[in-house]
Amino acid sequence: MLGRIRTLSYTSSQHRCSLKRSSNDDQSLPGRPDPRSAHPPDYGLRPDYPENHQIRGIQRRKRMIKARVLYIPTESHTKRVFRPDTFQRLRSIFEEVKVNETGRNYTSEQLAEEISGYDALVTGWGSPKITPQVMENADRLKIIAHSAGSVRALLGEVVERYIIPRGICVYHSRHAIAYNVAEHTIGLMILCCRRIMDHALAFRERGVWRDPNIPSNGQFLRGSTVGVVSASAVGREVMKLLKPFDVRILVYDPYLSDYDAGALGVERVSLEELFARSDIVTVHAPSLPETWGMINEKHLKLLRDGAVLINTARGRIIDHDALLEECRKGRISVGLDVTDPEPLPSDSPFRNLPNVIITPHMAGAGFYGYFKIGEMTLQALLDFFTGKTPIGAIDPSEFARLA
C-alpha cells in the first residue's frame, strides 16, 4: 500500500486486534542471509530462535501451542516457500496441523466444509477465495496467515462483514517478497544506467567491442537523484539498498507523513516534481483503480533526456501508450518487470526497442526470498499465539488500499 504502514497489537487472551502505530514498519525486519553459507540460515525467525529449537521459551517436545491450524497450500507451494526443517517446526509446535495432502488446491466449498474448529488458516498461491460461507463456518478462526503476497483477491467481500468485526488478524508475506523485488529493482537501475545489455549483446551477437553506435546515458546510479513512487514495503527496501550509492531520494506518497519522510531520510514531493527532478524513477505503488494510469504522458514528458524509469510494481500503473511514445524517441532508458498486458504480445513494439529491458515478472522470485516467506509465516503464527504483534499483520483500516 501507499504510505505509512501501521501494525497491530493483540491481547493473548482474546487475540483481537488493536491499532498500534509504527513510524517505520520495516525496522524490525530480519537481516539478509549470508550467501557464502553452505546451508541457508534461519533468517526470518526472531533472533531468539536458537538452534536447539527453543522458541520464545517453548520447547517443541515439552510444550505445544494449543491451537489448531488448517494448512491448505499444495505440496508444490510448500516446497517452494518452506525449507523442510521450517515446515516440520510448523507441524510440531502446534496442537494440531492439518495439511493439504491431496495434491490439488482447495475449493471455496471444500474450505467451508473443513474450517470449523480451527484457530488458524494458512493460505498461499492458488488458495481459493474466502467466501461468506467459509466465514460463517469459521467459528474459531483468529488468524489468516497468507504465505504469499497480496490478499486482496483472497479476502474480497469478507473484510468488512467478517474480518474487521471479529478482530481476525490477517498476515501476508509482502515483507519477505520485498527483499527480492528491491534487489531486482537495483539491478535494473544499473543495467539501464550503463546500457549493459546493449553492449553485451553487441559483443556476443556481432562481435563489436565498445560499439560507438550505442548511446551513453551519461547517467550513473552513484550520486544521482532517485524518485521513489510509493513508500511501500518494496519502496522502503529499495531506499535501504540505495544508501551506499550516495543518492538523493525523493518520494511521492500521499499517505507518507513529513515525520516519516524525515525518519526515512527522504524528501516528500508531488508526483510532478518527482519526475521533473529525478535522474532515476522507480515505481512501487499498489495496483488499485485509483493508481491505474497514474503515471501518464504529462509525467513522462517531465523526465530529462537520459533519465531511467523502472517499474517492478504493476504494469497498469503506467500509461503504456504514453510510455511507448517516449521510449521510441530514445531519450530515456526503461526497465520493466511488469507490463500491460502481461506478457506483451509477440508483435509489441516494446520487444524491439534497444532502450527497453523487459524481464518476465520475476522480481519477486528467489531461493532465499521464497524460503523467507515460510520462515516469516511461521514466525507470524508464533507471535500471534504468544500475544505478540506479527510483522506483516495488516491494519484493518487500510485493507482498501492494499494491492
Image: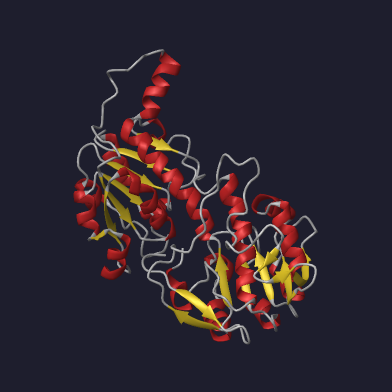
- Give the residue drawn at x 54%, y 77%: 159
Using the image, determine if residue 335 lies above or below residue 262: above
Q: Is residue 357 visible?
A: yes
Q: Is residue 106 visible?
A: no
The colouring scheme, among rainbow, by chain, secondary structure or one colour, is secondary structure
Using the image, determine if residue 257 lies above or below residue 370: below
The quadrant where residue 269 appears = bottom left
Using the image, determine if residue 108 lies above or below residue 375: below
- In this rendering, position of residue 197 left or right of residue 297: right
The residue nearer to you, when weighing 152 against 269, is: 269
The residue nearer to you, when weighing 49 against 144, is: 49
- Picture coordinates of residue 339 (x, y %)? 43, 46
- Picture coordinates of residue 223 (x, y %)? 25, 42
- Picture coordinates of residue 56 (x, y %)? 64, 70
The residue nearer to you, when weighing 164 against 90, is: 90
The quadrant where residue 153 appears = bottom right
- Give the residue drawn at x 34%, y 49%: 243
- In this rendering, position of residue 116 left or right of residue 15: right
- Give the residue drawn at x 51%, y 54%: 31
Count of numbered marks = 0
- Picture coordinates of residue 378 (x, y %)? 65, 64
**Which image quadrant: the N terminus?**
bottom left
- In this rendering, position of residue 326 left or right of residue 369: left
